[in-house]
Amino acid sequence: MILVSVLLGAILGYLFDVKILTEASILIEPLSYAIVFVSGLSVGYSLNGRKLKKHLIIDVFAMPIFISIGSIVGAMLLGGFAGFNFWQSGLMASGLGWYSLSAIMISDYDIGLAAMALMINVFREIFAIATIPFIARYVGFLESVSAGGATSMDTTLPVISRSTNEDTTIIAFANGAILIIVVPALVEIFINIGFK
């Protein structure tokens, strides 16, 4: 469904004059805040009344930090092979799998980089869904959470849940919720570095 939506949107955008998107873009920021607020509520609700083990609390807060650093630094190091500089690679990877928001934020400045960010983050999600069971089985449960990035609280959560255990599922949900709060800031930082 993700790929079909992207392809259908690209075809319609190419064939028709979709000026309505310019007017609709004013809704992006308030909707982003609403998503982040609901994510915060979800994390609080999922942790409410639960006696978390000490190592779980550490993992909940350490995972987003390491996933953010690893994703962005990895992209910066490998982006050169695809012809991108460090900043462009970091910008596109800063969506951490949240393809819709990062692409929309970048599209105000560079439509080509926005399209690449969209595809990179869509492929990250698809790759995560396909590989999480193998990563969980042969590498480790926490490592399987990192594959999903920001999607570990929604689209990749069922795969993580089936492939790991209850503790890892809690960490995955909290990780995704925290990353959804972090992604807009990361994308904005890279936009400010490169465009402002």
Image (cartoon, rainbow, N blue to C red):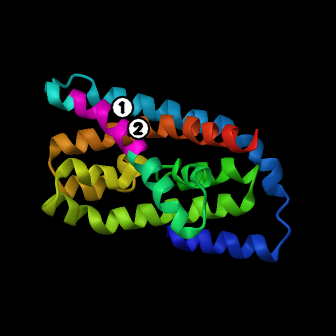
Residue at 41% from the left image edge and 35% from the top image edge: 178
| Type of the residue with mark 2 | Ala
As rendered, which of 14 and 139 lies closer to the eye?
A: 139
Whole-percent x, y for residue 159 in the image? 27, 59
Q: Which SS class for mark 2?
A: helix
Disc 2 target residue? 177
Give the extent of the magenta segment: 57-69
Name which quarter of the figure residue 107 lies in.
bottom right
Residue 63 lies in the magenta stretch: yes
**Residue 160: quarter of image:** bottom left
Identity of the residue drawn at 59% across and 59% down: 117
Per the image, the residue denoted by label 1 is 43
The quadrant in which residue 196 appears is top right
Q: Is residue 85 highlighted in magenta? A: no
Mark 2 touching mark 1, by CB under 8 A?
yes
Q: In the rendered image of this protein, does residue 96 appear above or below residue 81?
A: above
Overall secondary structure of the magenta section: helix
Q: Residue at x 59, y 42 (%)?
A: 187
Expressed as whole percent of the image width and height from the top left, the position of residue 141 reads 18, 51
* Relative image position of residue 96 (x, y in whole percent): 47, 49
Q: Residues within 10 Å of mark 2 (few under 14, many from 20)?
A: many
Amino acid marked by disc 1: Val
Q: Residue at x 43, y 47 (%)?
A: 150
Q: Residues within 10 Å of mark 1 (few under 14, many from 20)?
A: some
Q: Please tell me whether residue 154 is drawn above or below residue 122 in the rendered image.
A: above
Which numbered disc covers residue 70? none
